[in-house]
Amino acid sequence: MRKQVKRLDFSDRKTVAALYEGGAGAAEIAEKVGVSRAAVYTELKRGQDGVTLDKNLRFAYDPALAQKRVQEGLRKCGKRKGVDQNV
C-alpha cells in the first residue's frame, strides 16, 4: 500500500512560517502540519532568500516566496490544476 502524500497549500505555508518564526523545530512543525520532517526541511529551503535572517539567527522563511516558487515549478511542468493565481 502506498503512503499518501500531502502537498502543502498556502495556508499550510503560513502555519509553517508562524511556527518557524516562533522557534519551533522541523519535527514539531511536521507534526502540526501533518507532513514528514524532510518535507518541512524542503519547504524551509524553498522559502528562503538566502540573505535575510530571522530573530533566531536562522534564514528567514517567506511563505509567499515559497508559494511563488511552487507555482513556477508547476507552470514549467505544464500542470495547471491546483495552482492558486491569487497569491
Image: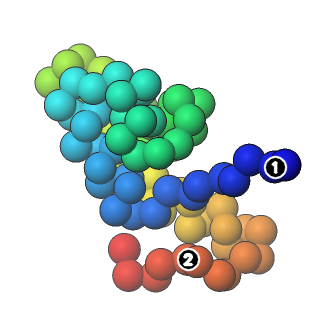
Q: Is residue 61 above or below residue 73?
A: above
Q: Give the percent coordinates (x, y) of residue 47.
A: 43, 44
What's the amino acid at mark 2? Val
Q: Give the percent coordinates (x, y) of residue 31.
A: 41, 36
Q: Is residue 74 above or below residue 29?
A: below
Scheme by which the image is coloured:
rainbow
Please indicate whether residue 15 sits to the left or right of residue 5 in the image.
Answer: left
Q: Residue farthest to the top?
A: 57
Q: What is the C-alpha distance between the residues marked 2 and 1?
A: 25 Å
Q: Which residue is mark 1?
A: 2
Q: Is residue 75 above or below residue 67?
A: below
Tag 2 secondary structure: loop
Task: Mark yes or no: residue 59 visible.
Answer: no
Q: Residue 49 falls in which quadrant of the image?
A: top left
What's the amino acid at mark 1? Arg
Q: Which residue is mark 2?
A: 83
The answer to whether marks 2 and 1 mark residues whose Cβ atoms lie closer than 8 Å is: no
Name the residue: 58% across, 77% down. 82
Please indicate whether residue 36 sits to the left or right of residue 73 in the image.
Answer: left
Tag 1 secondary structure: loop
Residue 18: give its label.
none
